[in-house]
Image (cartoon, rainbow, N blue to C red):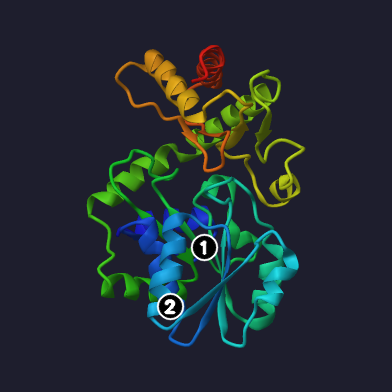
């Protein structure tokens, strides 16, 4: 890994050092392995992406580390979940699945009192929108394929923190064979060159789509942290520099989210031809919800695609 790339990544996070690993999963695993030993306890926020949850549920216990979970939005839950052997706290913010934001002040206070590590996975924000180290975290993780290296050419993970901690993660990375492919460095360099422009566009476009969707007759409700009525809006205003690219739309009865998403994707493809559509429309886990991950298309194109899809499925809901 080139020193210039390491410095660039560290500067983005306000960290002493940064490390590139083979994947976001490798970043989570090697950080946990560097900080935890058999007999230790990890206290994690319950809202986690699937790969992290599976590693915590199956792999860490097999290595002798106990993991328990708390609602990350319940401040007192962190203190109630502590054990004598707790050695680290783990938070995902924004939560990849829902876009919810976590107030870092309660876990940060506990970590400071006990001298233990606060780990934050900020994949859903990118360092343009959120730098957890500035808000008391000890280490920040990213699955870089979400924003930092968005070309889909391979998995890349990033860990940033103090030099000593990052060096411990580096040793685990080598021991467990989690080094990235050599081409990953060039891919990251290319992604970093346009990162700020891309993320600012996505922030602005997602905000426009959320405001538009709030007035659409075929959208029952909108969940987007950038809107004043979102429960996490105060956390956004306090700790985040951008509103993010993810919004959830609740569709009324008669609309199938999967069909709406398929129609919207097809409509966008008509405008971009053979190029890959960056915006994603996905049926959410809960019935009636459509997840929209706004990409690089203009907000007007995304709104047009959604409007056309909602009109088609309203006329033919089956």
Extreme-front residue of the structure: 318
List the residue tagged with mark 2. Answer: 61
Identify the image quadrant of residue 25: bottom left
Residue nearest the viewer, comparing 229 with 21: 229
Q: Is residue 84 left or right of residue 267?
A: right
How far across and how far down the image is residue 225, in percent? Answer: 67, 41
304 is higher (above) or lower (below) than 193: above
* Label 2 crowd bin: few (<14), some (14–19), many (20+), radius 10 Å: some
Residue at image point 28% right, 65% down: 178
Helix, strand or loop at label 1? It is loop
Between the C-alphas of marks 1 and 2, the distance is: 30 Å
Q: Is residue 146 left or right of residue 15?
A: left
How far across and how far down the image is residue 110, in percent? Answer: 69, 75
Residue nearest the viewer, comparing 68 with 87: 68
* Label 1 crowd bin: few (<14), some (14–19), many (20+), radius 10 Å: many
Q: Is residue 1 visible?
A: yes
Helix, strand or loop at label 2? It is helix
Q: Is residue 279 left or right of residue 208?
A: left
List the residue tagged with mark 1. Answer: 15
Residue at image point 59% right, 45% down: 99
How far across and how far down the image is residue 297, in percent? Answer: 47, 23
Residue nearest the viewer, comparing 306 with 220: 220
How far across and how far down the image is residue 76, in percent? Answer: 75, 69
User: Of marks 1 and 2, which one's residue comes earlier in the chain?
Assistant: 1
Residue at image point 42% right, 75% down: 60
Residue at image point 46% right, 30% down: 258
Q: Is residue 19 visible?
A: no
263 is higher (above) or lower (below) than 111: above
Identify the image quadrant of residue 273: top left
């Amino acid at each position: 890994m080139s020193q210039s790339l390491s410095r660039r990544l560290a500067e983005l996070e306000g960290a002493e050092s940064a490390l590139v690993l083979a994947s976001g999963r490798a970043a989570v695993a090697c950080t946990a392995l560097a900080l935890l030993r058999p007999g230790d306890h990890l206290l994690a926020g319950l809202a986690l992406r699937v790969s992290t949850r599976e590693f915590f549920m199956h792999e860490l216990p097999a290595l002798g580390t106990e993991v328990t979970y708390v609602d990350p939005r319940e401040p007192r839950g962190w203190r109630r979940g502590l054990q004598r052997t707790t050695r680290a706290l783990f938070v995902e913010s924004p939560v990849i699945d829902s876009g919810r934001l976590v107030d870092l002040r309660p876990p940060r206070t506990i970590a400071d009192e006990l001298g233990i590590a606060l780990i934050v996975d900020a994949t859903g924000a990118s360092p343009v929108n959120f730098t957890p180290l500035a808000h008391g975290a000890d280490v920040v993780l990213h699955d870089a394929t979400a924003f930092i290296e968005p070309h889909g050419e391979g998995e890349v993970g990033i860990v940033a923190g103090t030099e000593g901690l990052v060096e411990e993660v580096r040793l685990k990375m080598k021991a467990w064979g989690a080094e990235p492919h050599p081409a990953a460095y060039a891919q990251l360099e290319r992604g970093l060159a346009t990162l700020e422009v891309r993320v600012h566009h996505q922030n602005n476009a997602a905000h426009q789509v959320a405001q538009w969707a709030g007035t659409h007759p075929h959208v029952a409700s909108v969940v987007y942290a950038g809107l004043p009525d979102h429960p996490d809006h105060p956390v956004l205003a306090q700790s985040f520099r951008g509103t993010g690219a993810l919004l959830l739309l609740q569709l009324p009865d008669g609309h199938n989210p999967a069909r709406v998403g398929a129609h919207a994707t097809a409509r966008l493809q008509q405008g971009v031809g053979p190029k890959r559509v960056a915006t994603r429309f996905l049926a959410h886990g809960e019935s009636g919800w459509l997840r929209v991950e706004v990409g690089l298309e203009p907000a007007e194109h995304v709104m047009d695609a959604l409007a056309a899809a909602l009109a088609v499925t309203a006329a033919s809901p089956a």
